Image: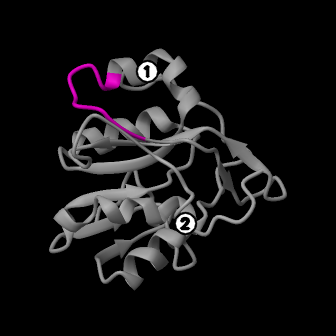
Amino acid sequence: MTNGFLFTSQGKNDECYTPRYGVEPLLEFLPKFKDKIIWLPFDDENSEFVRVLSENRYKIVNSHIKYGQDFYRYEPEEWDVIVSNPPFTNKREIFKRAIDFNKPFCLLMSLTWLNDSTPKKLFRDESLQLLLFEERMQFKGQAKDKINFSSAYFCRDFLPKQIVIRDFKNFNQGSLF
């Protein structure tokens, strides 16, 4: 136990990748960050976050643990907002660190996490915002591209209101299930 939070063991599905159609809905909310630097802390050059934001001419800085840029120890010299799909292992510590930066963030997470007491404690004095989707996102990863569960973007100072609901019908998602 560290800082009042329990660490969990390494998950088997921490390298689950967000499909393009899971990143594209963020474009609606990113214009207010057009002149800001968006840090993608869990993203290598193959990430759809890197691709979609770069294609739309956002200023990004991406980092990944495989380059020795551990989110718990690394921070770019300049950045203004965090956007990414973090590993689900140690999500408590990831969100604690994101909150401690005191900057806007938008991090994808399983909705089942709301069943845990930790997000309630973490966001008690924060202005939690949720970007929910009508459909489930199908992630790509170690489970033969069949990782499919309800997820949402957990945000702070990112969305125009506390809860926003969107669907993927306007995006090229292919088969969802």
Q: Is residue 96 left or right of residue 134?
A: left
**Residue beneath disc 2:** 171
Kindly identify the residue that appears in the image at 22 percent across and 46 percent down. 160
Task: Looking at the picture, tell me which residue is in the foreground, 1 or 10.
Answer: 10
The residues bearing labels 1 and 2 have C-alpha atoms spaced at a distance of: 33 Å
Task: Looking at the picture, tell me which residue is in the foreground, 11 or 48.
Answer: 48
Is disc 1 placed on a helix, strand or loop?
A: helix
> In the image, which residues are magenta?
122-131
Point out residue 88 in the picture as x, y percentages from the top left corner: 57, 42
Q: Crowdedness of circle 1 by 10 Å Cα count: few (<14), some, many (20+)?
A: some
Q: Is residue 156 above or below residue 5?
A: below
Query: For the residue marked with disc 2, what is the amino acid?
Result: Phe
Kindly identify the residue that appears in the image at 49 percent across and 67 percent down. 43
The quadrant holding residue 33 is bottom left
Task: Looking at the picture, tell me which residue is in the foreground, 5 or 142.
Answer: 142
Point out residue 80 in the picture as x, y percentages from the top left corner: 19, 62
**Residue beneath disc 1:** 118
In the displayed orientation, state which residue is furthest to the right: 144
Point out residue 167 in the picture as x, y percentages from the top left corner: 52, 50
Q: Is residue 55 left or right of residue 160?
A: right
Q: Is residue 3 magenta?
A: no
Query: For the residue marked with disc 1, what is the amino acid?
Result: Thr
Kindly identify the residue that appears in the image at 54 percent across and 72 percent down. 47
Q: Crowdedness of circle 2 by 10 Å Cα count: few (<14), some, many (20+)?
A: few
Point out residue 147 in the picture as x, y percentages from the top left corner: 74, 48
In the displayed orientation, state which residue is furthest to the front: 169
Is disc 2 placed on a helix, strand or loop?
A: loop
> Is residue 154 in sight in this rendering?
yes
Q: Is residue 20 left or right of residue 126?
A: right
